[in-house]
Image (cartoon, helix red, strand yellow):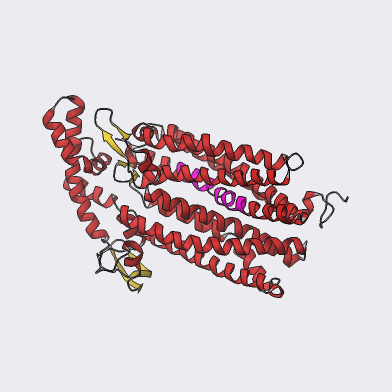
Amino acid sequence: MISEQLVDLSRLQFAVTALYHFLFVPLTIGMVWLLVIMESVYVMTGNVVWKDMTRFWGKLFGINFALGVTTGLTLEFQFGTNWAYYSHYVGDIFGAPLAIEGMMAFFLESTMIGLFFFGWDRLSKPQHLMVTLLMAIGANLSALWILIANGWMQNPVGAEFNYQTMRMELFDFWAVVFNPDAQAKFVHTVSAGYVTGAMFVLSVSSWYLLKRQDIEFAKRSFRVAAAFGLASSLSVIVLGDESGYTVGESQQTKLAAMEAMWETKPAPAALAMVASINEAAQKNDWEIEIPWLLGLIGTRSLSKQIPGIHEIKAKNRERIRRGMVAVSALETLRARRDDALAKQVFERHQADLGFGLLLKKYVSDVNQATPEMIERAVNDTVPRVTPMFWSFRIMVGLGFAMLALFIVAFWSTIRAANMQKPWLLRCALWMLPAPWIACELGWFIAEYGRQPWTIYGVLPTHLSVSTQSVNSLYGSLAGFIGFYTVLLVIEMFLMIRFARQGPGSLGTGRYQNEAVHHA
């Protein structure tokens, strides 16, 4: 059996690298469309300030993109180094979207970024705008294919287990592509990226307006960010509702944990706004609820029930018992491939194979599992409720706070005299970290809420890891944290340096803080 410490360290290392990487991804996805908007106005009007806006914000975008690529490369290698059995087990399915992402999206995006920075004097205005547009499409296609891969981990469709090869094998590629979980996750995640880009531009522009630095440049940037941010915030909320519905359809355990719903409630279920969660007693000591809301979000109906944690555990207990039969039959088939009776038994219980494999965490031969081991495996099927419950509420609270800010900011751009209200600008400046916090919490909910599975309901996490030494994981984890922290400090230094200097860093002679003064 794999040691629990090895599994925990492998999970921690992947979580650290993923969360570091996701500091850069949302800003890349969001800012690139703001560049398209700004350059489109430049091409249509010929007003050079819009070109300067595209170039300046593009410079900050480029710094962020470079760090995002650097931190993202290690993630794909970790599937081979830390999660070798996972890669063997599902490589046929999981590898396809990642390969397409590299060939279709990453190369397109990288090529267009080079042309974006070095093509201003070599391409016509429409040609350069097309480069910027293709750069934006490439960034979003990259997110699409990665989220298709991740969506399949959340809801494994279009594939089945082959007992002869001991692997999951793809039989319907388009089912993987059009997986409802993947599509909902994609539109929700990229919309969150759009909010991040808009908040970044809005906050930095607010800082210029507070400092009375390059006011006309800042006003235009503020207007674009406010309008784009308002549309994006509304999109995040609407698509977040759709994402909640898909979770309710395919991952009822995650939904119950997010909502601290221990007991199955009469339909339509109420949504707990806040609650005092007592995990030891598996209940809430008290809660403040909004009637009907969870039922409407989770089921789109007034009559369909959402199962509570206790009901889910009872179902999982039965699935584990049936899964024990599937594991036993599979081990017989591994020894005697032509055993017709074992094949018949396996095919009858194959749907519960993953649940039987949960017992491998505690005993090598699942037939020797004690009632206590089965109960521990049952408890493993539900992640800890408290971090899920509060992470979700903080994320949603930040989302609505950003929506309120964008509404006020957009209204202030209509009434131009209000745009420079110091209280509004300070609010925008202080809200700068909000989208990153919300995005990181969203990924935590998605990934921690999937536990104890790497492939939901199919492959337990503890069976997915490579056979490495604990010391090597400690060493590589320390190395990753140190290296990534250095990269983060470098990005923060460069971003703050160029943001402070503002459009004067372009050296056009039209702005304050010019490094070069010429017409």
Q: Residue at x 65, y 52 (%)?
A: 35
Task: Report whether 432 appears left or right of 339.
Answer: right
Any part of residue 479 in sight? no
Residue 412 position (above or below residue 180): below
Give the image location of residue 485, x and y in percent: 59, 45
Q: Residue at x 20, y 33 (%)?
A: 330
Asked if the stretch drawn in magenta spans residue 26, the answer is yes
Task: Report whether 442 appears left or right of 331.
Answer: right
Task: Report whether 375 appears left or right of 496.
Answer: left
Give the image location of residue 497, x and y in percent: 72, 51
Give the image location of residue 145, x and y in percent: 47, 42
Magenta residues, dominant SS class: helix
Q: Residue at x 51, y 64 (%)?
A: 234
Asked if the stretch drawn in magenta spans residue 512, the answer is no
Give the image location of residue 40, x and y in percent: 67, 53
Residue 148 position (above or below residue 227): above
- The foreground one among 277 and 45 is 45
- The quarter of the image holding the N terminus is top left
* Residue projecting furthest to the right: 518
Q: Residue at x 59, y 64 (%)?
A: 431
The magenta-colored residue range is 13-33
- The foreground one among 516 and 447 is 516
